[in-house]
Image (cartoon, helix red, strand yellow):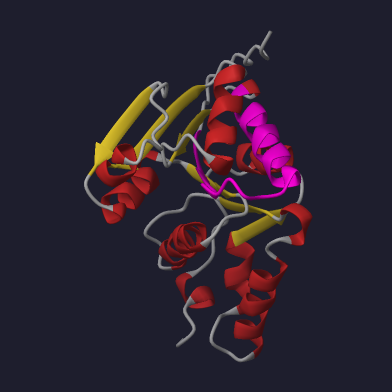
Amino acid sequence: MGVIPQENTTSIRIAVYCSASTRIADSYRDAARCLGTAIASAGHELVYGGGSVGLMGEVAEAVSAAGGRVHGVITETLVALEQARQTCDELEVVQTMRQRKHLIAERAEAFIALPGGLGTYEELLETLVSRIVQEHSKPIVLVNVDRYFDPLLAMLQNGVEQRFIRSKTLSLLQVVTDPAQAVELIEREPSGTHLDFNDVIPSR
């Protein structure tokens, strides 16, 4: 029997960025399932890339198993490759990856990134840049499973040290190791951290 979602009058649409790779360690799969369960059991909705494989498939299955709602956005190409999760509560099919990213970002009210490859990095960094230039004020949480994101965090810190990135920018990206804690952070601060524009633009 799945987890019964809590009654929640403040349901949050949470976008999850993660890998579609099937050649990954079990610890990453466990984290994806934990996150999906946490999202659904708290009464929130998953918005994601609509895939049925890799971590995308794991998080979506966990949300559904726990009684949550799943909203997928996927491209026609990936549907043709039979990677779409046809059992999503809602599945939007678009032509390009650019449209896919735009719709996910538009539908979501918060963002969580699990380990992933180039697509995950692209989505995460684009969302962070949009937050920096105040195109949105939605919280962004990085789940650093097995220290996967340590090199990325070191690169960002190096950007601060070399004065390409303002130090306060990094406060816009919250980092946890426990997937369930990512959901708790979003619930505590649904509108994201507020920073003055001058605090995050490197040229000022």
Left or right of 134 in this view: 36 = right
Left or right of 5 in this view: 25 = right
Magenta residues? Answer: 13-40
Placement of 122 over or under 59, stated as above or below:
below
Left or right of 84 in this view: 29 = right
Question: Residue 116: x, y in percent?
Answer: 57, 55
Is 127 a magenta residue? no
Placement of 58 over or under 133, stated as above or below:
above
Question: Residue 120: x, y in percent?
Answer: 50, 57
Q: Which is more toward the observer, 118 or 188?
A: 118
Residue drawn at the location 47% of the way across and 78% of the way down = 201
Give the quarter of the figure containing the N terminus: top right
Residue lying furthest bottom in this view?
162
Residue 150 occupies quadrant: bottom right
Residue 62 occupies quadrant: top right
Placement of 167 over or under 90, stated as above or below:
below
